[in-house]
Each structure stands twice: as structure tokens, then as C-alpha cells.
Image (cartoon, grey):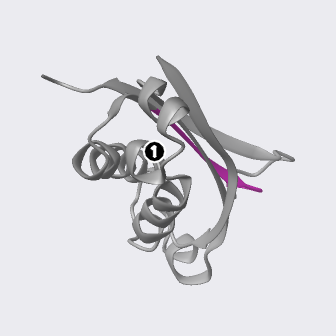
Amino acid sequence: MGQIKVENIRVYAYHGCLKEETNIGSDYLVDVEVKANLKKPAKSDSLVDTVDYVHINHIVVEEMKTPSKLLEHVGQRIINRIFSEINIVKKAKVAVSKLNPPIGGDVEKVTVVLQEKRRS
């Protein structure tokens, strides 16, 4: 088993429970970590045998375009797409961070982390 990480994917998106958040938008960072058997691609040196991190980035960018009230919801959509579209992924971990959240304090970011195993 090996892992592939795609970290600090920066996206401007429109998530939140407040009307202002969905109108004005905010900066987000998304980290994705997937686990898969990487023995075949380590031997073959072929992109078709591994997890294409360009594909992961594409999934994140697309899912972040759809507004959600909760970061948990967008994080789960990202995990669902990874399992649906990248067959060799056995485990996925997604962290979605909202930078400078409007919570009435000096807070750099809030982060929601979801982790799941592929169901057989």
C-alpha cells in the first residue's frame, strides 16, 4: 500500500450558512490523501496504472464550484467522486479549510477532515 498526497489546493468558492458567504465567497485550501496499491505503477512507470494527481485536482476544483452550506458536505462529495472515478483508491482522506472564516474573531482557518475506506 502506498499513498499519494495533493496538498494546499487553493480554490475560491462560495460555501457557508450565511448569505454573505455564498454571495461574496472566500478562499479555501483542500488537502487530499489517498491510499492505493502502488506496486504495479512502481514497476510499469505508466500513468494508467496509478492515481493521477491531476485527476484528483480536477475533482476538487469541480466539487468546490458547487456551493454547500457545510464543509462536511463538499468534503464528502470529493471523497465520493474519488471512489467513483479512481478505482485503485482504497482509502481517501480530505481536509477542507476555510481561510479567514467570518466567526467574529482572529481565526486563520477552520478545517473539516473526512476519512473513508472503499466499501467492497
- Whether residue 16 is visible, yes or no, is no
Inspect the magenta stretch and tell me whether residue 98 lies in it.
yes
Which corner quadrant holds the C terminus? top left
Query: Depth check: 19 or 108 in front?
Result: 108
Which residue shows up at 34% across the image and 47% down it? 82
- Is the residue 118 above or below the residue 56 in the image? above
Spot occupied by residue 22 in the image (x, y as percentages of width and height) = 50, 75
Which residue shows up at 38% across the image and 71% down it? 66
Spot occupied by residue 16 in the image (x, y as percentages of width and height) = 49, 61
Residue 69 quadrant: bottom left
The span picked out in magenta is 93-101
Query: Depth check: 63 or 68 in front?
Result: 63
Q: Helix or strand or loop: what does disc 1 sit on?
A: loop
- Whether residue 86 is visible, yes or no, is yes
Query: Depth check: 39 or 54 in front?
Result: 39
Inspect the magenta stretch and tell me whether residue 32 lies in it.
no
Q: Is residue 5 left or right of residue 100?
A: left
Instruction: Mark 1: give few (<14), some (14-19) or many (20+) Cα within 10 Å.
Output: many
- Is the residue 111 above or below the residue 42 in the image? below
Spot occupied by residue 97 in the image (x, y as percentages of width and height) = 64, 47
**Residue position marked by numbered label 1 in the rendering:** 51
Q: Is residue 14 left or right of residue 8?
A: left
Q: Residue furthest left?
A: 120
Identify residue type, mark 1.
Val
Q: Is residue 80 left or right of residue 115?
A: left
- Is the residue 14 above or below the residue 85 in the image? below
Query: Depth check: 95 or 99 in front?
Result: 95
Residue 79 quadrant: top left
